[in-house]
Image (cartoon, rainbow, N blue to C red):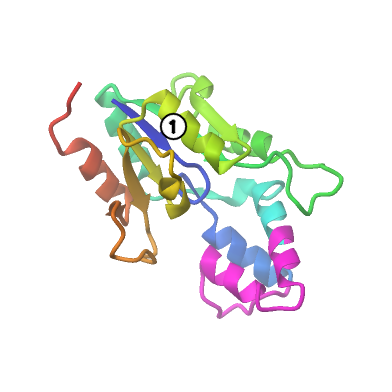
Amino acid sequence: MKIGLDFDNTIICYDQLFYELAIKNGYVFPNANLGKQFIRDALRLLPDGEIAWQRLQAEVYGPKIAGGILKDGLKNFLKEGVLRGVTFYIVSHKSRFAAQDKDCRDDLIIAALKWLVDKRIVGVGCPVDIEHVYFLPTLLDKVKKIQTLGCNFFVDDLLDTFEVTDFPSTTCPILFDPHFLANRDIHFTLCHSWQDIKKKCFDVREHD
């Protein structure tokens, strides 16, 4: 079995980090709601809010990424997959440099890879081989890679991935929705936790 995983907000959780940095930069008050989407929506209401949001993203995805944490339940999911002989891939749409990093000081792909290695997700003796990690410049490139790899399942927090016309019909899309934000009328498998995803992928009869 082959399982593909998105990176941002699927493997790594930025909620607390976005919250802390938004407060530090004076964008939100300490009693504001926690969560990336709330902070993004709140910032976009401010004058030049989109620029402020992009600057915050550049900080979080680059020099501050070490503050991101593993999604709860992910390690147990990966451990179960390894025991079952699953081949894991990480396939993510990520630019090498942030839009607001005009000097290109922080390589976001190198930062993400370092985080994955530091967390023992990627590398020798880890669930994911470093050769199985792909950061791609466009969403279409991401979907094409999922198709080329022949993933049986793909887990992503973004519905946009699954709505690309070329998303492979042979791959089961799993929308990861930990904050219960998705429309219940979607035509994809909806999971709210890695425990749910583990059940979907492994508590069924597997086919070669």
Horizontal relation, residue 183 to residue 132: left or right: left
Horizontal relation, residue 75 to residue 40: left or right: left
Q: How crowded is mark 1: few (under 14 residues within 10 Å), some or many (20 or more)?
A: many
- Quick check: is 109 in the magenta stretch? no
Give the vertical position of 197 relative to 128 (above or below). below
Give the vertical position of 108 relative to 120 (above or below). below
Q: Residue 77, image x and y in percent?
A: 31, 39
Q: Residue at 59% across / 35% down in the picture?
A: 136
Relative to the observer, which residue lies in front, 178 or 49?
A: 49
Q: Residue at 43% across / 44% down in the picture?
A: 165
Amino acid type of disc 1? Ile
Give the vertical position of 37 relative to 157 (above or below). below
Name the image quarter holding the C terminus.
top left
Q: In which image quadrant can residue 103 be found?
A: top right
Relative to the observer, which residue lies in front, 122 or 108?
A: 108
Horizontal relation, residue 203 to residue 42: left or right: left
Q: Residue 174, image x and y in percent?
A: 33, 46
Q: Residue 197, image x and y in percent?
A: 28, 45
Q: Name the residue under label 1.
A: 146
Residue interval drawn in magenta: 26-55
Q: Residue at 30% across / 33% down in the picture?
A: 170
Q: Is residue 192 visible?
A: yes
